[in-house]
Image: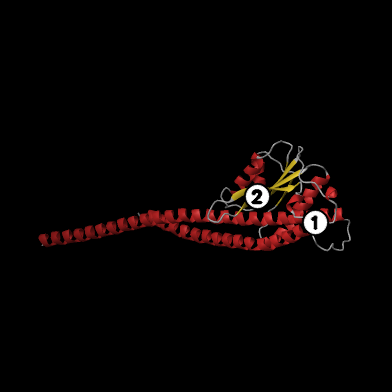
Amino acid sequence: MSGRLNEVTTHLDTTRELNLVVTAMRGIAAARSREAQQHLAGIRAYADIIGTAIGEALALVDVAARPDGPPTRAQRHLRIVLCAEQGFAGNFSERVLAAALDAQESSNDSLFVVGERGLSLAAEQARTPDWSDSMAVHPDEMPSLAGRIADALYVQLDAAAATRVTLVHGVPGGTQAQSIVSRVLLPFDYSRFPVASHFRPPRITLPPARLIANLAEEYIYAELHEALMLSFAAENEARMQAMMATQGNIEQRRDELQAEFRRLRQEEITEEIIELSASRLGSRQVANERITRE
């Protein structure tokens, strides 16, 4: 009996330690998700400034010379998929990658995968990305990662390997499951920026067409940065929810072990009482037999 009781006691100690680890992971994930979302206001303010500049730059050229909107012809498609770098985030990366692969229209479509978990899942499906990188594990690393994605993207564009680019990533959903969204990066839609009117033309050092193109590239960088931050927040939110579910399972298992511990302990006490009573009865019987002989 004591062997089984010691085993249950060991399991109880293990569940307590595991619960501490899971609680710590849950707290870290919650803090990272909040930190990432706090960066979004600054990123969006920067994008708004670039968007206003695009509107002002468009006013510098004639209507006929302004860049066209998205073309309607068939396009070679590149999807940039933002997955998790680390595990314990439920099926977050599976859902993001599935959303990208399910939307593919041709086997010739290109694929960028960010995040080790997404890269492993793609390998399981015999999909080799045209480019991949590790997902940043801290918000401060996002600007550098956005720059690397942009550089790889323009290499593809220069080689005419893609004419349409879509970002696929998760967004935080609070207490709900994280939504997976697809955002078109290219062809760049200039029509979403109101053309400035009744303003004093600024002094520029670049031809207007070149200025507009540079501002569009800067806006795409801001969109990449925002998507990375949203994905990072969603990933950690999914991890936090996974840890909450794990905690529930641990607590249920702990309650089961505690109930078994009490049962085994009670059985052990009962056995000890029975053994003690039997010992006393045996001693009394021996004493009575001795008195009878005398």
Where is residue 26? Give x, y as percent.
54, 59
Where is residue 245? Give x, y as percent.
49, 53
Foreground: 171 or 66? 66
**Quarter of the image containing the C terminus?**
bottom left
**Which picture quadrant has residue 292?**
bottom left
Where is residue 267? Give x, y as percent.
30, 55
Q: Please tell me whether mark 2 sits on a helix, a strand or a loop.
A: strand
- Whether residue 264 is visible to the viewer of this picture, yes or no, is yes
The residue pinned by badge 1 equals: 215
Q: Residue at x 63, y 60 (%)?
A: 37
Q: Which mark is residue 287?
A: none
Q: Tell me whether the residue at label 2 lies in contact with that at label 1, contact meaning CB atoms closer than 8 angstroms.
A: no
The residue pinned by badge 2 equals: 169
State which mark lies toward you, 2 or 1.
1
Say how many tags the image has: 2
**In the rendered structure, which amino acid carries the disc numbered 1?**
Leu
**In the rendered structure, which amino acid carries the disc numbered 2?**
His
Q: Residue at x 52, y 61 (%)?
A: 23
Q: Residue at x 21, y 61 (%)?
A: 280
Foreground: 128 or 52? 52
Foreground: 52 or 264? 52
State the separation of the CA atoms marked 2 and 1.
24 Å
Q: Earlier in the sequence, mark 2 or mark 1?
A: 2
Foreground: 267 or 25? 25
Q: Is residue 77 left or right of residue 11?
A: right
Colouring method of the image: secondary structure
- Whether residue 3 is visible to the viewer of this picture, yes or no, is no
Crowd tier of the residue under label 2, counting other residues whose Cα lies within 10 Å: few below 14, some 14–19, many 20 or above:
many
